[in-house]
Image: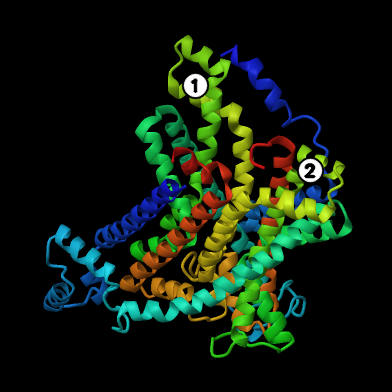
Amino acid sequence: MTQAKPAALPKNRHWFAGIGMPASIWLCCVWIAIVILIGITTQWITPFDYQQQSPLARFAAPGALPGHLLGTDYIGRDLLSNLLVATQTSLMIALAGSLICAVIGTSLGMAAAHFGGWIDNLIMGFADAMSSVPFMIIALGTLAFFGSSPVLFVFLVGIASWERYARLTRGLVMSANQEGYAEAARIVGVPSRRIYLRHILPNIAGPLIVQLTVNFPEIILLESGLSFLGLGIRPPATSLGLMVADGRNYLVIAWWLTALPGAVIVLTTLSISLLGDFLRDRFDARLR
Amino acid sequence: MISFILARFARAVIVLVLAVTFVFVILRVSGDPAEQMLGDLASPEAIAIVRANWGLDKSIPEQFLIYAGNALHGDFGVSTTDGRPVFTIIAERVPKTLIITISSFLLTVLLGVPIGILTAVRRGSAADKAVMTGAVVGYSVPSFLLGVGIIFLFAVWLRVLPSSGSSTWQHAVLPILTGTLAGAAGISRFVRSAMIDILDQPYIAAARADGVPEWEIILRHALPNAAIPLVTLLGFSAGGLLGGSVLIETVFAWPGLGSGFSQAVSYGNLTVVQAMVLTFTAFMVTINLTVDILYAVLNPKIRLQGNDAS
């Protein structure tokens, strides 16, 4: 355990020491912070109940009606409240999905690296098969056969790119196993599970976190795409993709119904992508 | 090289067989198709008739053989919503999707590759920064949102092109534009970084020192070396366009495979869904096989392998 520390330090130190960030990356961080804040505080900051309809106040443009800062939609629901709740939903799904994806992918990658042989072949073969068909097709097929439920949907979004984590982890674990600290821990009799979780995982966390920032926006796009098709989040719940789908029927008379949720999607994915690119260039050459 | 291609071909066949099996198994696991088709209120007699009609009363292995045999003949049964043969539905949608996908793909390459090369050569210039910012933004905009934006610009605001349907060639313009923009962003970014890596190599410096003109360095020395990773990426982007057709065709109400697939899923039209899954898989297998063959042709390590043996 103590022998492992010095080997771990030089890699991890980058993560804390002087990060010179350009202004654009700062802006991205600010936007991400705002979105996270929205995700946490939605319940308390929505001006209206997001489902509350008021037929007399339909299609109010942003700022046209007092109280409705961003206007209202085609049945008079407050757009700002809807937007906040939708952002929260999309964010929660992307977060849950990312975590599921990371856990499944990392575990399978470790298993492939640890056992080798036919288990390795099976896992990697499955990974190859999954990445050879666009996930959209797999997702639609699964939703058709098993019906759409929120739990299945989150899980589905979560397995979207597990194979990338699996490949990455497998490679990283294989090279980590060659390094002194893992070998040392093994010789003094530390059980395998403990070696992986306590010693190897912290050492390979950097590239995995970068992968998470690459993956997160893709999951947001997948979720919004499926919801846009009416196959993901369904009313009365709401999500950004669903709001775009709803709003596009009224494009001619109320552009804001589509533009505002669309802008939130783009700004969020863009911010996380840019931050991810920045982190990748900064800390990890392997993913380039 | 021949053995490499044969091995890849065998793998493609295996993937297809697996896909057929997978679809069959999942269809049977997800519940009794007869009950799903008729709903909860159907009488037992009606269910029995449907089961007999569809061969659902036979044993599972027997059903699988019949199913696989029929699938080989292109017989996927009839649509559960309108009773038309599934093969006809697929057959009339395939060309529509190919028009959009192939045109978008070609335009993506014609747009993305030159942009990638130019920005790599003029690295750090204002044009490079502008184009790359555009590419990053393009990468973050979901294709359906891009489609909606394009509809707003060309069909609602400028009123120059139709936004939905497929009756005239004008109807194809906006979906193709959407697919192209969505794909070109990724490709130009990739070509740029691949070219930058290669242009920094010593052999490029050597060629420059030798007085080889710049255009020749780029076209004869740098580009062929970027070709191998590029082919892999193009395979992915063709697959991406095909997967993205689900969204783009839905936005533009373009009656192709993608919109048909999402409709079939919404209506729970399982016979169509399974045929769609198989059609998309077949397309993907073809694309991947093409990529593998191109890879073998382009990569001297594989290309010359067979020659050494013979």
Label 2 packing within 10 angstroms: few (<14), some (14-19), many (20+)? some
Which part of the image, by quadrant, shows the N terminus of chain A?
top right
Residue A195: assigned label? 1
Q: Nearer the viewer, residue A271 or B105?
A: B105
Residue A80 x, y percent position in the rendering: 68, 68
Does residue A76 appear anywhere in the picture? no
Residue A122 x, y percent position in the rendering: 37, 40
Helix or strand or loop: what does disc 2 sit on? Answer: helix
**Tag nearer the camera, 2 or 1:** 2
Hey, what amino acid is under mark 2?
Ile
Give me the C-alpha separation between circle 2 and circle 1.
46 Å
Helix or strand or loop: what does disc 1 sit on? Answer: helix
Q: Nearer the viewer, residue A223 or B269?
A: B269
Does residue B210 appear anywhere in the picture? yes
B218 left or right of B252? right
Q: Nearer the viewer, residue B128 or A12?
A: B128
Let me know if marks 2 and 1 both belong to one chain: no
B42 left or right of A105? left
* CB contact under 8 Å: marks 2 and 1: no
Q: Is residue B261 above or below residue A130?
A: below
Residue A132 x, y percent position in the rendering: 47, 54
Residue placed at 49% from the left, 38% from the top? B308
Hey, what amino acid is under mark 1?
Ile
Which part of the image, by quadrant, shows the C terminus of chain A?
top right
> Label 2: chain?
B
> Label 1: chain?
A
Residue denoted by label 2:
B204
Residue placed at 55% from the left, 57% from the top? B236
Residue B100: assigned label? none
Number of marks: 2
Residue placed at 67% from the left, 68% from the top? B181
